[in-house]
């Protein structure tokens, strides 16, 4: 199917270019249909085809519990996804981050919170690495923790993460439940 689309895009490009270099009076007659065909094919390939296939959930894409879902909403609301990614890419920079992410990992995630820039650590597989008490302390006061205090040897100390001490205990528990679900 994608081969056919690629051939159609190539054909419409040739039609467009042919119209540009053809005789002056015929240019518009060839160029306009070629451009229209290119626009239609581009729209279909980027806006329609992705919704035609079914993405099967992976074990990581299991539905969230109510508490985890509330934690995820807090994660989005507080902007955690600006600094923390949740996507392991198949590139050298992500080597050692864990299993490469698959589309099925995100079937229950809306909006998707893959991150914008990896300023803080990637959280794709962080669930279960640290105890709830560690997360509770880290959310309340993340900056003074040294590598040893944080229990994260080899990581950079002196976190730039802001404090989330203003969150209620219930919100902190929900946020921890969400973070612990990221495995």
Image (cartoon, rainbow, N blue to C red):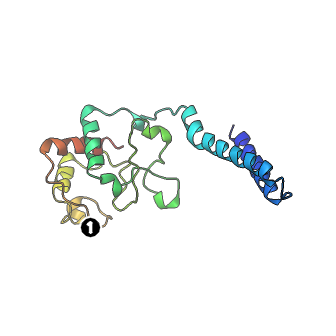
Name which quarter of the figure residue 157 lies in: bottom left
Residue 53: tell me if it is visible. no
Q: Quadrant of residue 68?
A: top left
Quarter of the picture containing the C terminus is: top left
| Residue nearest the viewer, comparing 59 with 175 | 175
Percent x, y of residue 61: 41, 36
Q: Residue at x 18, y 66 (%)?
A: 144
Give residue 22's position: percent from left, percent from top.
Answer: 85, 57
Q: Nearer the viewer, residue 43 or 126?
A: 43
The residue furthest front is: 25
Most foreground residue, 28 or 154: 28
Q: Is residue 141 left or right of residue 181?
A: left
Where is residue 130 drawn, in percent x and y? 26, 50
Location of mark 1 (residue) = 157
In the image, farthest residue toward the right: 23
Q: Secondary structure at mark 1?
A: loop
Quarter of the N terminus within the rendering = top right
**Does residue 171 appear in the picture of this structure?**
yes
Query: How many numbered dots are placed on residues in this image?
Result: 1
Residue at the image point whose x is 25% and y is 61% from the top: 161
x and y, in percent, of residue 26 in the image: 83, 52
In the image, 167 versus 89, the foreground residue is: 167
Q: Which residue is located at x 46 percent, y 57 percent?
A: 94
Few, some or many residues within 10 Å of mark 1 (<14, 14–19, 20+) = some
| 123 displayed left or right of 52 | left
Q: Is residue 180 left or right of residue 91?
A: left
């Amino acid at each position: 199917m994608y081969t056919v689309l690629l051939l159609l895009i190539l054909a419409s490009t040739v039609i467009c270019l042919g119209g540009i270099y053809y005789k002056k009076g015929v240019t518009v007659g060839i160029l306009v249909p070629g451009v229209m065909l290119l626009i239609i094919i581009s729209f279909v390939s980027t806006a329609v085809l992705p919704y035609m296939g079914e993405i099967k959930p992976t074990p990581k894409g299991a539905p969230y519990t109510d508490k985890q879902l509330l934690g995820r909403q807090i994660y989005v609301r507080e902007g955690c996804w600006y600094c923390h990614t949740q996507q392991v890419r198949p590139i050298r920079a992500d080597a050692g981050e864990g299993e490469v992410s698959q589309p099925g990992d995100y079937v229950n995630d809306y909006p998707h919170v893959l991150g914008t820039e990896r300023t803080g650590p990637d959280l794709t597989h962080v669930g279960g690495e640290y105890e709830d008490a560690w997360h509770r302390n880290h959310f309340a006061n993340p900056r003074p923790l040294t590598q040893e205090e944080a229990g994260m040897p080899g990581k950079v100390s002196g976190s730039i993460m802001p404090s989330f001490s203003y969150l209620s205990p219930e919100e902190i528990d929900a946020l921890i439940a969400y973070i612990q679900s990221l495995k």
